[in-house]
Amino acid sequence: MSVPLNNKTAERKKRAVSLDLARGAMLLLIALAHAPLYLYTSEPGIMQRAESISFFDQVVNLFGMFFIDNRARAMFAVLLGYGFVLSFESQISKGKRERDALKTIRRRSWYLILFGIMLAVFIGGQDILMAYGVAGLLVSWLLTREIKALIRTFTIITLIYCLFTPIIWGFNMQEIGSYGFAPEVSATDTYLSTTMLTLISFPIIPIMIHFMFPVLPSILVGMWIARYQFLTKPEQHLRTLYFITFIGLTVSLVGALPLSFLGSLWYPSFFIAGLISGLHMLTGIAGGLAYATIFGIIGARLKKPGRISHSLMALGKRSLTFYVWNEAMLVLFLSPVALDLGGHVSNGIAAMIAVGIWTLSVVLATLLEKNNLNGPLEMLLRRLVYKNK
């Protein structure tokens, strides 16, 4: 039975509202998560956060622990997994064979890896595109399988991460001998030295991300909710979306609570601190899923998107371009190889810089939308992936 044209239009609208709003907001969370990594003159705080100097820094750090760290990455992964399913189903609906559709997904994943290499080596940004490209190669086979195979794979992989992630981080923190990590950048860094170092070390980046962080479970859960169209047809799943959001946020906040006590109210051994950090990462899976479902609820409830919503959606439609742009801007403003503000500002100010960079992205994306222009990297990726089509 064919779907009336107006219903199709409505479905596309709902998809744009839910997914594009989520992607636009996700870029803010990622910018806030990555900004502290450039504060090389600050003493280490908890995990990747710099030590608080002022009350504002304390507020920023606590907010980051509860709502950003290990949650923004998980949200990105959930939306990536959702996108895999959408891309695959879109190709099948156009008459492609499953084998050819899978080849396209895998080709896209290889190009994500290439884009990630360019970002890490030549821009010097904090990259996760390589890790997500590798994930696409690892999980794409599930696109042709039944939902039971997806759930079974998710369960097995998540259990493995639950067993080993806290232990890995326990020994890691014990080896470091601190509750926090020293920044990877330093005052002596130059563009040439960092480029040459990353050129040698970039193959290890996606391996270490998948080894140290539970990325795959979030991607798989994104594929799972895509099978039920939770974000593309959210109005049909509101009760479930509310339930997932409540449970996910509860798990995420409870999982972040012990980490917030470290170094202030609680001084456990470094191994125990590592276990707590692992718990923070694992519960971030629930947080990332909850963030995605929140925008499903918004998409179902938002009848007429306003100016702000349209601007955020414009950013979300160009999330690849502006993810790379935001990382480049963080390097420009904070890195010692550029303007070097990271050597002179505190965590709170760095967060404000990240918000400013993201705000500029919203403005630029809105201008592109008004001129009916796609993001440059989206256009390039499409031409590369479909060059023989």
Image: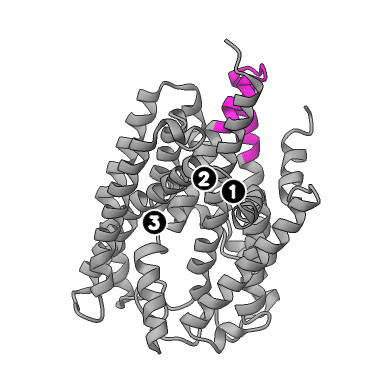
Q: Which residue is drawn at 67% across and 75% down?
A: 332
Could you tell me if residue 132 is visible in this image?
yes
| Image location (x, y in percent) of residue 305 | 59, 48
Mark 2–mark 1 distance (CA, rounded to whole Å): 6 Å
Q: Residue at x 48, y 77 (%)?
A: 183
Q: Does the magenta stretch include residue 114?
A: no
10 Å crowding of disc 2: few (<14), some (14-19), many (20+): some
10 Å crowding of disc 3: few (<14), some (14-19), many (20+): some
Kindly identify which residue carries mark 3. Answer: 212
Which amino acid is tagged 3?
A: Met
Main secondary structure found in the magenta portion: helix
* Mark before the other along the chain sequence, 3 or 1: 3
| Image location (x, y in percent) of residue 77 | 48, 47
Disc ID at residue 302: 2
Please say if 224 is above or below 323. above
Specify the quadrant of the image occupied by residue 93. Answer: top right
Disc ID at residue 305: 1
Mark 3 or 1: in front is 1
Magenta segment: 86-108
Provide the secondary structure element on which disc 1 rests. Answer: loop
Q: Which residue is drawn at 47% across and 43% down?
A: 301
Which amino acid is tagged 2?
A: Leu
Which amino acid is tagged 1?
A: Pro
Specify the quadrant of the image occupied by residue 13. Answer: top right
Please say if 261 is above or below 257. below
Please say if 134 is above or below 363. above
Mark 3–mark 1 distance (CA, rounded to whole Å): 39 Å
| Image location (x, y in percent) of residue 337 | 66, 80
